[in-house]
Image: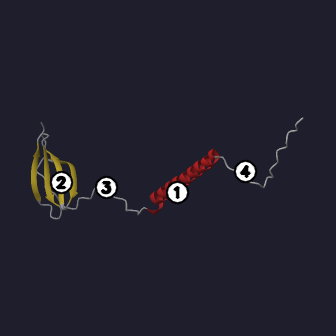
């Protein structure tokens, strides 16, 4: 009768050869870990730049500029419905007693009327 030969036991200190599938899996996990680290750094850099390093521009005022002319002359019976100032010119839409609209321009410094343009409705 043949006795089976005992297989030698390996001590825990000995390294076993690594199978190719395990090596491939180890490389894949290492690559995915590296990709995750790069992605987290990219997101953190984006948040940091957007919140911390972006130059702070002064807030743009959306309030209209005040009209600076001392007086504006209107024909009798006309009222101003809309007024604004831009580039040294005061613009106003006026309405007469019959409902006709006109666009009037004045010089912002002197208050002298520059032009009158009727607004026609179709």
Q: CA distance from mark 1 to mark 2?
A: 53 Å
Image quarter hosting the N terminus:
top right
Q: Nearer the viewer, mark 3 or mark 4?
A: 4
Residue 39 on image: x %, y %: 51, 53
Which residue in the structure is indicated by mark 3? 63
Which of the labelled discs sits on residue 41, or is there none?
Answer: 1
- Which residue is painted at 21% across and 49% down in the image? 82
Label 3 CA crowd tier, 10 Å (few <14, some 14–19, many 20+): few
Question: CB under 8 Å between callouts 3 and 4?
Answer: no
Residue sitting nearer the eye, 70 or 102: 102
Which residue is most to the front?
1
Question: CB under 8 Å between callouts 4 and 2?
Answer: no
Q: CA distance from mark 4 to mark 2?
A: 89 Å
Q: CA distance from mark 1 to mark 4?
A: 37 Å
Which of the labelled discs sits on residue 120, or is there none?
Answer: none
Question: CB under 8 Å between callouts 1 and 2?
Answer: no
Q: Is residue 58 left or right of residue 68?
A: right
Which residue in the structure is indicated by mark 4? 16
Which residue is most to the top?
1
Q: Is residue 53 left or right of residue 103?
A: right
Residue 117 on image: x %, y %: 10, 49
In terms of image quadrants, where is residue 109? bottom left
Which residue in the structure is indicated by mark 2? 91
Label 2 CA crowd tier, 10 Å (few <14, some 14–19, many 20+): many
Instruction: Choose the circle earlier in sequence order: 1 or 2.
Output: 1
Q: Nearer the viewer, mark 1 or mark 3?
A: 1
Residue sitting nearer the eye, 15 or 60: 15
In terms of image quadrants, where is residue 14? bottom right
Instruction: Choose the circle earlier in sequence order: 1 or 4.
Output: 4
Q: CA distance from mark 1 to mark 3?
A: 41 Å
């Amino acid at each position: 009768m043949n006795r089976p030969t005992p297989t030698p036991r390996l001590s825990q200190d000995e390294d076993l050869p690594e199978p190719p599938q395990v090596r491939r899996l180890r490389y894949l996990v290492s690559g995915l870990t590296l990709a995750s680290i790069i992605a987290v750094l990219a997101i953190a850099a984006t948040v940091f730049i957007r919140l911390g390093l972006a130059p702070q521009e002064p807030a743009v005022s959306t309030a209209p500029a005040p009209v600076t002319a001392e007086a504006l002359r209107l024909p009798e019976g006309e009222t101003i419905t809309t007024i604004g100032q831009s580039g040294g010119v005061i613009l106003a839409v006026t309405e007469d007693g019959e409902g006709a609209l006109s666009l009037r321009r004045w010089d912002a410094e002197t208050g002298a009327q520059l032009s009158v343009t009727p607004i026609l409705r179709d």
